[in-house]
Amino acid sequence: MTLSTGTQHLFKLELNGSAIKAYVDGTLKINATDASLASGKIGVYTHFAQAYFDDVVVKQV
């Protein structure tokens, strides 16, 4: 997907067991499963672009 530069976007990632859901601005963009992601850490990254990240929150529900 292509995002406009100079525009703020809200990203949300949900992991529940092997289920993965990714949202951009409230719209579901990815709905997948991957059993290889049983544990790990988070990080934010851009590729060939500059970005600013704030209010990164991780919580168990």
Image: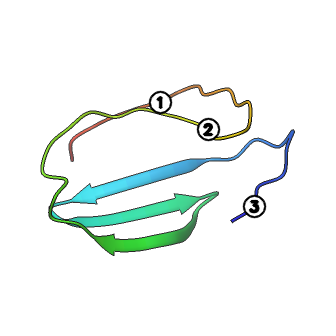
Distance from label 1 to label 2 (Cα)?
15 Å
Could you tell me the amino acid type at mark 2? Thr
C-alpha span from label 3 to label 1? 22 Å
Name the residue tied to disc 1. 56
Specify few, some or many for label 3: CA neighbours under 10 Å numbering under 14, 14-19, or 20 or more.
Answer: few
Residue under the point 60% across and 58% down: 24
Q: Nearer the viewer, residue 13 or 44?
A: 44
The percent position of residue 52, horizontal first and vertical second, equals 68, 26
Q: Are there few (<14), some (14-19), or many (20+) residues within 10 Å of tag 1?
A: few
Residue receiving disc 3: 2
Residue 58 lies, in percent from the top left, at 33, 34
- Quadrant position of the N terminus in the picture: bottom right
> Of the residues shown, which amino acid type is indicated by label 3?
Thr
In the rendered structure, the answer to whether residue 14 lies left or right of residue 50 reads left
Q: Position of residue 28 (x, y in %)?
A: 52, 70
Mark in front: 1 vs 2 = 2
Of marks 3 and 1, which one's residue comes earlier in the chain? 3
**Marks 3 and 2 close (CB-CB < 8 Å):** no
Q: Nearer the viewer, mark 3 or mark 1?
A: 3
Labels 3 and 1 touching (C-beta < 8 A): no
